[in-house]
Image: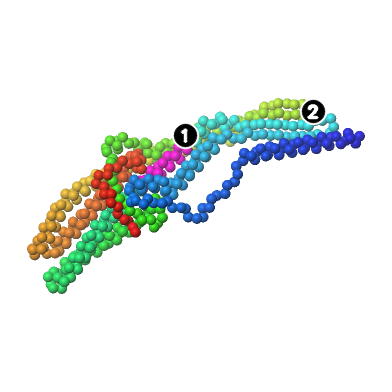
């Protein structure tokens, strides 16, 4: 009797030991495929600054350098990689549900019972088409947004480069005139004491030099500000010296502009992708108004050793409104995305028309200045010769010189505005600014030190 009473206990212990061993093996197998924790690298220190080129900067080299080292664009690269990973994660099907239960009877004459079940959510496969389209559209948005950010970066580098270059030319022109006036004031000091010239002559020279000094000071301050912004765009330290060469004229012919299309701008394509995403989400919301289906298989044995195989279906019913609110939100979101696309197209066409009008007005102003400037220079030369003969007073000569200098400054500013408009046109009409064809006619390869 003692041996017979101990037999069920021994069977129970063996069964429990086998269950524990099987569970442990399953857990170990699951841990083998698990990823391990990796600590975040030390980000407390300052990032390593890129090494600038030893030769002078050109407009193309500055643009390409910014596309490789701009901190915001590097962050955008990481965001794009994250978007790709998220798109891949969204395509992973939901895991299957596995259930296992074991029952051991304590009464004699009965058998161990178990139940094994496997279930899978079929809604993932039934709703795969609209969900996959939405994921692909969202990924296209991320890619196109990153590309548009690169376009904007290239255009910003070009604009800052042009600003600095023309501010340098303006400062050199003003400094030359200031030095000439200072020499004139020093030379006229003795003549004024001798009564050969009046005080009005010196006063006019002092007024001219004060005005030009103020303009030179404002140009230097703006150059310092633009240089700092250009270094930030290039990802360079604040104390990096910039030596710039003369920027070339962009070779944009009428055929290139006419062949371009604003529909191919990355931001426009991103808005189209947004419409596709919202449309796919709208169709997914329509499917979500139907119940979600899960299918399961069961394999069981009771304590009487009766084995069964079964099939189970699980339905998840939507809310009582038939998912109406979600459908309404998705439909309105699609309408909003379409309106944003239309507004962007209208804005681009308006900006293009305004830029073309600005270019026409700048060209007209340039022609007027270039038509008047030779006559003013000739009058100035004649007045200087007449002053040497005592036929014209110095005030007339100084007034003419101030007019000539102001016209030269106006012509320089006009050239800067025209070239900035020419470099702003490609991205506006759908041409990548980083691969913009340029004409080097008239370019001076000699560098100019921006800052020491």
User: Residue at 15% of width from left, 73% of height from top?
Assistant: 193
Left or right: residue 412 versus residue 265 is left
Residue pointed to by mark 2:
304
Residue 293 image-quadrant placement? top right
User: Residue at 25% of width from left, 50% of height from top?
Assistant: 414
Compare residues 357 and 424 and report the one nearer the observer: 424
SS class of the residue under badge 2?
loop
Residue 195 image-quadrant placement? bottom left
The CA span between labels 2 and 1 is 56 Å
Query: Residue 385 lies in magenta, yes or no?
Result: no
Left or right: residue 99 versus residue 123 is right
Left or right: residue 188 versus residue 325 is left
Query: Residue 147 lies in magenta, yes or no?
Result: yes
Return the disc, 2 or 1, that comes first in the chain's sequence. 1
Above-or-below relation of 251 to 194: above
User: Residue at 61% of width from left, 32% of height from top?
Assistant: 121
Residue 206, percent from left and from top: 21, 66
Q: Quadrant of the N terminus?
A: top right
Residue 45, percent from left and from top: 50, 55
Residue 328 shows up from this direction: no
Q: Which residues are magenta?
A: 139-156
Q: Quadrant of the C terminus?
A: bottom left
Q: Which mark is residue 279?
A: 1
Compare residues 262 and 213 and report the one nearer the observer: 213
Compare residues 446 and 166 and report the one nearer the observer: 446
Residue 415 shows up from this direction: yes
Q: How many marks?
A: 2
Which of labels 2 and 1 is toward the front? Answer: 2
Above-or-below relation of 172 to 308: below
């Amino acid at each position: 009797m003692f041996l017979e009473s101990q037999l069920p206990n021994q069977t129970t212990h063996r069964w429990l030991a086998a269950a524990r061993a099987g569970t442990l093996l399953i857990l170990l197998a699951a841990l083998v495929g698990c990823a391990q924790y990796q600590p975040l690298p030390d980000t407390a220190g300052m990032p390593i600054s890129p090494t600038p080129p030893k030769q002078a900067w050109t407009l193309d080299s500055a643009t390409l350098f910014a596309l490789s080292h701009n901190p915001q664009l590097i962050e955008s690269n990481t965001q794009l990689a994250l978007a790709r990973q998220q798109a891949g994660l969204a395509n992973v099907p939901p895991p299957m549900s596995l259930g296992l239960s074991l029952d051991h009877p304590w009464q004699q004459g009965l058998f161990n019972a178990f139940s094994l079940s496997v279930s899978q959510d079929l809604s993932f496969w039934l709703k795969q088409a609209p969900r996959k389209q939405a994921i692909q559209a969202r990924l296209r948005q991320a890619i196109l947004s990153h590309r548009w950010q690169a376009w904007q970066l290239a255009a910003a580098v070009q604009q800052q480069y042009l600003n600095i270059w023309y501010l340098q030319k303006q400062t050199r022109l003003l400094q030359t005139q200031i030095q000439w006036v200072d020499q004139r004031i020093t030379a006229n000091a003795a003549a004024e004491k001798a009564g050969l010239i009046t005080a009005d002559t010196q006063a006019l020279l002092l007024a001219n030099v004060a005005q030009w000094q103020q303009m030179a000071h404002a140009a230097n301050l703006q150059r310092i500000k633009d240089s700092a912004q250009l270094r930030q765009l290039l990802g360079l330290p604040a104390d990096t010296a910039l030596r710039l060469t003369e920027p070339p004229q962009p070779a944009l012919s009428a055929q290139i502009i006419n062949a371009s299309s604003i529909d191919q701008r990355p931001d426009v394509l991103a808005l189209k992708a947004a419409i596709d995403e919202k449309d796919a989400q709208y169709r997914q919301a329509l499917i979500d108004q139907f119940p979600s289906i899960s299918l399961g298989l069961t394999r069981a044995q009771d304590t009487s050793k009766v084995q069964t195989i079964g099939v189970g279906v699980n339905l998840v019913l939507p809310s009582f409104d038939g998912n109406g609110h979600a459908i309404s939100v998705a439909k309105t979101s699609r309408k909003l995305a379409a309106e944003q696309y239309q507004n962007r197209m209208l804005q681009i066409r308006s900006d293009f028309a305004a830029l073309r009008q600005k270019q026409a007005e700048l060209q007209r102003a340039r022609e007027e200045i270039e038509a008047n400037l030779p006559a003013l220079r000739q009058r100035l030369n004649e007045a200087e010769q007449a002053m040497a003969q005592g036929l014209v007073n110095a005030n007339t000569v100084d007034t003419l010189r101030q007019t000539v200098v102001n016209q030269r400054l106006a012509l320089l500013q006009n050239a800067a505005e025209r070239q900035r408009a020419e470099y702003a046109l490609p991205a506006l009409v759908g041409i990548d600014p980083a691969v913009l064809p340029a004409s080097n006619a008239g370019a001076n390869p000699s560098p100019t030190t921006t800052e020491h």
